[in-house]
Structure formats: C-alpha cells, structure tokens
C-alpha cells in the first residue's frame, strides 16, 4: 500500500512528518509522499524540511517517506517553471493541484501541468479528452481521489483514462489522521470509479513500477 498525495503541518495538514509516517506505517504502508501545497512564496521553505525529515526518518521506519510537493493554484503560465524548480530542489514526486470541481482552480491548469511533465495531476475534475490523450503520451498519472469533494469526478477521469490509456493513481489527499485509507478502502475507491478488480491491480502495478523502483 502506498499513497503519494498527503499533507503535513508545512501546509494545511495536521501532522508533523514523523507522526504522519508512523500512522501510515501502522496501516501497513510501504511508502508515502508528503506533497505539501506550494507556490513561489514557500516552495523553498517546504521542500528542504520534508527532505530533511525523510533522510532522518527513513533510517528507522519500515515505511518510506518520499519528499514531494503539490503546486497549488499557481497561474497556468507559471506551472512549468515551478515544476522545474521543485525537481532542482529535490522533490521526488511533483504533484499539481488540478481543476477539481469544488475549488476555483484557474482553467488551463490541467493542460499546463501535463505539458510541464508533472508526475501526478491531482483531482483533475472534468478533464478533457485532449488533456487525457496528452497525459497518456507524457506518462502523467491522473488521480482518483479518496477525498470528499475532489472524488466527485473520479468516474469521469477513470473512463477517459481507460479510453486513451492514461495512467491512474489512487491517493487520499490526506490532511488529518482520519483521512488515511486502508488498502481495502483505496481499492474500493478505484472500483467505485468504475474500474474492474483487474484494472485496479494493474493500476497499483504501474504506480509501483514508476515510483518505487
């Protein structure tokens, strides 16, 4: 079990990295990524702290902490620059906050994130066919979200991903202790989005091959 979209106190989460990692370890996770919300104002503050935590905690934890970032509500024209900066700063997973149905994300964010080569496009809402085709070409993972509100378009995302061969990932977008999913529940999120058991199994295989080499 793994989850590559979680938040700590470095943005709007409730837990310090040590407690976050401990809680998912107890749930049997193999790995978790902390991907706190960032724009130009705080990316250089957040990432070094997550990296420092990962270096220390991974020496003693069964579950691996992966340092990442979620580029959030950044104007589409500035997303590519921040994706590049995040990688230079050491982010192992770069997520972009997609055009969810429940927030006023600027139109064009999904396309900009995919063109920039983000690893994961989080909760992309009513993503277009053109964008899903491009995600398939560039290997950008489209998120099926376990989070209330963000999950409303999961069925739409899964259907287009199946049609055009885009890779999918199931994440919690956890902010609080009660948000972390068990493996059983995460798989149910995939099934609830319309995927078959085989497709969910293939999803986890693809994610493992990409992010846990």
Image: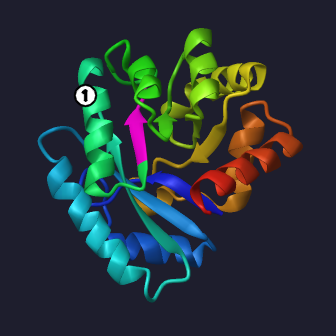
Which colouring convention does the figure follow? rainbow
Residue shown at 33% from the left, 82% from the top? 56
Q: Residues within 10 Å of mark 1 (few under 14, many from 20)?
A: some
Judging from the image, what secondary structure is the residue with disc 1 in? loop
> In this picture, is 77 found above or below 4?
above
- Which quarter of the figure is the N terminus placed in? bottom right
Q: Residue 99: in sight, yes or no?
A: no
Quadrant the C terminus occupies? bottom right
Q: Which residues are magenta?
A: 94-98
Q: Is residue 75 above or below residue 206?
A: above
Q: Which residue bears the numbered disc 1?
A: 74
Whole-percent x, y for residue 180 in the image: 53, 59
x and y percent of residue 15 in the render? 32, 66
Dominant SS type (magenta):
strand
Q: Position of residue 99 (x, y in %)?
A: 42, 22
Q: Is residue 155 left or right of residue 78?
A: right
Give the left or right position of residue 47, taking residue 154 as reference. Answer: left
Position of 201 with respect to 65 (left or right) is: right
Report x, y in % for residue 7: 36, 54
Measuring 25% from the left and 28% from the top, which residue is drawn there?
74
At horizontal 29% and vertical 65% (from top left) the residue drawn is: 50
Q: Name the foreground residue: 62 vs 191.
A: 62
Q: Quadrant of residue 184?
A: bottom right
Mark yes or no: residue 107 visible.
Answer: yes
**Residue 107 placement: quadrant:** top left
């Amino acid at each position: 079990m793994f989850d590559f979209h979680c938040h700590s106190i470095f943005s709007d989460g409730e837990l310090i990295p040590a407690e976050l990692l401990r809680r998912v370890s107890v749930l049997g996770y193999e790995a978790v990524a902390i991907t706190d919300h960032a724009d130009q104002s705080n990316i250089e503050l957040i990432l070094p702290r997550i990296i420092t935590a990962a270096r220390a905690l991974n020496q003693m934890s069964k579950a691996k902490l992966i340092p990442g970032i979620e580029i959030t509500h950044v104007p589409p024209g500035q997303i590519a620059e921040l994706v590049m900066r995040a990688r230079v700063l050491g982010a192992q997973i770069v997520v972009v906050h997609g055009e969810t149905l429940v927030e006023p994300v600027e139109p064009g964010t999904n396309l900009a994130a995919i063109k920039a080569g983000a690893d994961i496009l989080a909760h992309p809402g009513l993503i277009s066919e053109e964008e899903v085709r491009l995600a398939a070409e560039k290997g950008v993972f489209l998120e099926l979200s376990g989070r209330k509100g963000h999950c409303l378009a999961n069925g739409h995302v899964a259907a287009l991903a199946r049609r055009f061969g885009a890779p999918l990932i199931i994440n919690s977008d956890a902010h609080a202790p009660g948000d972390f999913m068990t493996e059983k529940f995460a798989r149910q999120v995939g099934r609830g989005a319309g995927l078959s058991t085989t497709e969910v199994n293939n999803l986890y295989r693809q994610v493992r091959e990409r992010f846990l080499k």
